[in-house]
Amino acid sequence: MDHLMPRFDKLLVLDLDETLIHAVETPLPNRWDFRVFDYYVYKRPGVDEFLQTCLDWFAVGVWSSSGVLYADAVVRQLLGGPERLAFVWSASNCARRYDPEAGVPVSGKDLKKLTRKGFQRERIIMIDDSPEKLAKNYGNGVIVRPFEGDPADDELRLLLKYLEVLGPVENVRAVEKRGWRSRVLG
């Protein structure tokens, strides 16, 4: 297989914090994987294999609601740099809105920004642990359990199985993604 040509003609958009990594100012009892600024960073179990496989299967972008310097530093630690990614976006690419139920501002990841860059709505899969950040992207979002440093976490292993099923689907928006975990385990 040619590593320059993805297996599926989709864009996979990945979140960083609590999706691929967990970063804290005070270290957890288990050993941290790397440091970024004042943060101790824990890689979600299986993240290296997950990223390599996703880069073989999809065009991959990273969209974090963190600052640009932090996002770039984490991407460098995880992938050695942004060269194989379609983009690395940060908080400046998020849309700010007020969540009246929670009473706080929320950084949303608006799919329109991707479609303006030429990506097709039905060919974008967004992975995030925060449903409120993908509220306007209902048909494109796959919500994962937040990762908070648990070394026994197996979410990425399960997600990879789900992405293998979702990858060849013509229109990802037409697939119900709620309960994806139980379908994989099914």
Image: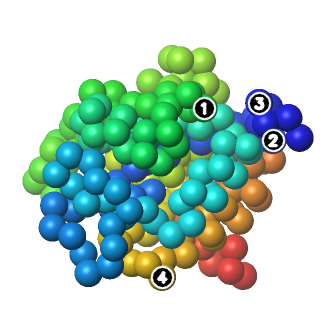
Which residue is at 39% across, 78% downward?
A: 150
Q: Secondary structure at mark 4?
A: loop
Comparing labels 4 and 2, the label whose residue is closer to the camera: 4
- Image position of 181 with respect to 63: above or below: below
Which residue is at 61% across, 57% downward?
A: 50
Residue 73 percent location from the top left of the image: 34, 39
Q: Secondary structure at mark 2?
A: loop
User: Dot 3, crowdedness within 10 Å: few (<14), some or many (≥20)?
Assistant: few
Q: Which residue is mark 4?
A: 152
Q: Which residue is mark 1?
A: 84
Q: Earlier in the sequence, mark 1 or mark 3?
A: 3
Asked if one can make out residue 22 in the rendered structure from this viewpoint, the answer is yes
User: Dot 1, crowdedness within 10 Å: few (<14), some or many (≥20)?
Assistant: few
> On the image, which quarter does residue 49 sit in?
bottom right
Task: Tell me if label 2 and label 1 are in contact, CB under 8 Å.
Answer: no
Which residue is at 65% across, 34% downward?
A: 59
CA separation in Å, label 4 and label 2 = 29 Å
Q: Which mark is residue 4?
A: 3
Q: Secondary structure at mark 1?
A: loop
Q: Earlier in the sequence, mark 4 or mark 1?
A: 1
Q: Residue furthest left?
A: 103
Left or right of residue 41, residue 117 in this image: right
Task: Point out the image quarter for the C terminus.
Answer: bottom right
Amino acid found under the numbered disc labelled 3: Leu
CA separation in Å, label 2 and label 1 = 15 Å
Residue 114 percent location from the top left of the image: 50, 26
Amino acid found under the numbered disc labelled 1: Arg
Amino acid found under the numbered disc labelled 4: Ala
Residue 92 percent location from the top left of the image: 27, 27
Q: Which residue is mark 2?
A: 7
Task: Tell me if label 1 and label 3 are in contact, CB under 8 Å.
Answer: no
